[in-house]
Image (cartoon, coloured by chain):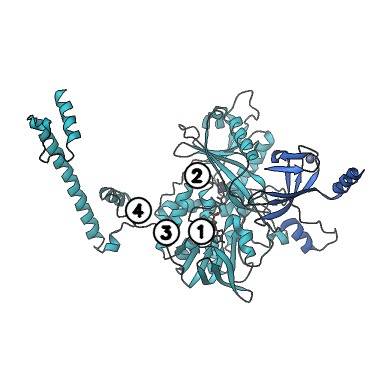
Amino acid sequence: MALRTSRAGAWVRCGSVGEACSSPDHANGNGGVIRTASIFLMFLRKILYYHHICELWIIVVRGGDEALILTDRYSVLSLLGEALRGNRGWKRAWRAAEPKPQYDVVIVGGGGHGLATAYYLAREHGLHRVAVVERGWIGGGNVGRNTTIVRSNYLLPENSRFYEKGMTLWEQLSRDLNFNVMFSQRGTLNLAHTPGQMDGYARRGNAMRLEGIDAELLGREEVRKMVPDMDYSDQARFPIAGGLLQPRAGTARHDAVAWGFARAADRLGVDIIENCEVTGFIRSGERITGVETTRGRIHAGKVGVAVAGSTSEVMRRAGIERLPIESHVLQAFVSEPLKPLIDTVITFGAGHLYISQSDKGGLVFGGDIDGYNSWAQRGNMPVHEDVISSAVTLFPNLARVRLLRNWGGIMDMSMDGSPIITPGPLPGMYLNSGWCYGGFKATPASGWCFAWTIARDAPHDLNAAFTLDRFAKGRVLDEKGVGPAPELH
Amino acid sequence: MRIGCPVCGDRDAHEFTYQGDGSRTTPPLDADQDQWFAHVYERTNPMGRHTECWLHTGGCRAVLIVERDTVTHEIFSVRLAGAQAAIHDEEAGQ
Ligand SMILES: Cc1cc2nc3c(=O)[nH]c(=O)nc-3n(C[C@H](O)[C@H](O)[C@H](O)COP(=O)(O)OP(=O)(O)OC[C@H]3O[C@@H](n4cnc5c(N)ncnc54)[C@H](O)[C@@H]3O)c2cc1C
Ligand SMILES: [Zn+2]
């Protein structure tokens, strides 16, 4: 006991252990303390020494050049090495590029889709003189605001094939980008509450299976086994009849997707130019030959526009006044962190609610758009009430959980609920838009297809149906068959 | 957000149903394809002042033409739409 107290005393009093010390404790001849202290010090020095060796090792292996010492590739080894050298050697994830006067391709909008497009342009089509021009900062748009659900459970073959391409890209994405996007295939379960809905899901599941996509129709008991905390009581307002499960669906960390694509594109030579708003387009005749920005003019062989909710205003700057798109606000909600409660993604079938649990424990959920045109990245109370009451209807045990955060994002709602990835509408220009509620899951496939479309001046088979003129020609892709409305999935 | 209904007074947005762009006018039935296409599918979707229709579902059930800023949600004007407006004006005049 005595030794412990005096040792504690010595630690407290001696700033630098093991050095000559006039502490009364030490002067009292407490040799044990000094010995313990110096053994500890030796140990500390060994660690420090090892740390230097590591640093040396990194320097030798990486060529000794100051610029090259920085750790670039992410791996267990580089993580360990950097931990030992105090994490001082990580290279910037992407350069703060200055705009050059001329590029082969300029992508307007540094959201998930713009960044993915630049990445695939460089990786798949060998175009390295590419710039992504972003008004704000990377991750500030919808790519960093969504509820992160990734799935490919569509009915129409054009949509299924496109989103399934996305799914296969997601399955490789962390490895491709050398960035952990935390893609978690925890499944998406669409609940049914009526026999009619069960029939509808059987049809959808069959359509998916015909496209080679995984789908399982679950009965009430199977759903209960999978998610025991929902309301299965006799009093349930909307009794659960069953559900459609896509086991390979799930979630991914949205910020990581933005950062991962930005970093991987940067490594392939793409310039990512932040704080640079496109204010107009350079034209030669009808043709778009570049962009006017808040950081000067940038000429480009081709200009791709991928600005999600801002599509109408950006296209207006090119003289396109009318599009089959409206901008609407969609809100997202996060609860205080809870112990594991939901290990999949659940969608309510008797209202609009989708809910999952983040790795930090927060319940992440959302519902309907606010319902009126909005360019404000914040929403109103009616939707709070609606979404939260749906959540509590489904999970009565959430009634006393507190809401931690809430925000909104501006979405590009197309008139048939399906996307647009197309050359045009002007020569030299390419448009990527109409992502509605679900563009996050599309990020890799959208970038992949848009890059193809830009590089080859023609759509790939996978996005051949996502034209802008499909509305005029009567070839709309209306998943629900409900007619033209800018509020569809 | 609150909307000042000319019939019922200032009411919470909860009571209303949005009915979209109110600046459009329905083309005649024999109008050509392009006109119908533009009417059904195309929108100007401005960032800023927008003319739109709201149905007062939880009130008088009148259709209102509202001028609203799509960024600040400030409402500049509210009036009754079409035929209803005529009836309202007539009654008000009596
Ligand atoms: C609350 C919410 C929840 C969602 N949940 C899901 C979900 O669970 N699953 C799913 O799949 N999808 C979801 N989405 C949809 C998805 O987030 C979007 O469809 C998708 O992120 C849009 O593509 P993006 O990432 O490229 O958009 P953004 O990240 O918005 O990128 C567009 C970029 O363009 C920039 N820009 C605009 N104007 C200009 C200009 N003039 N000059 C330069 N740059 C400009 C913007 O600053 C922005 O960074 C959700 C969306 C929201 C808002
Ligand atoms: Zn009224």
Q: In which quadrant of this rendering is ligand 2 seen? A: top right
> Which one is earlier in the sequence, the residue at label 3 or at label 1?
1
Q: Nearer the viewer, residue A292 or A456?
A: A292
Q: Are marks 1 and 2 on the same chain?
A: yes
Percent position of residue A282, x then y: 58, 72
Q: Chain of mark 3?
A: A
Percent position of residue A169, x then y: 48, 54
**Numbered circle sitting on residue A264:** 3
Q: Which chain is blue?
A: B
Q: Chain of mark 1?
A: A
Helix, strand or loop status at disc 4: loop
Q: Colour of chain A?
A: cyan
**Numbered circle sitting on residue A251:** 2
Q: Nearer the viewer, residue A58 or B70?
A: B70
Q: Is mark 2 within 8 Å of ligand 1?
A: yes
The residue carrying mark 4 is A74
Helix, strand or loop status at disc 2: strand
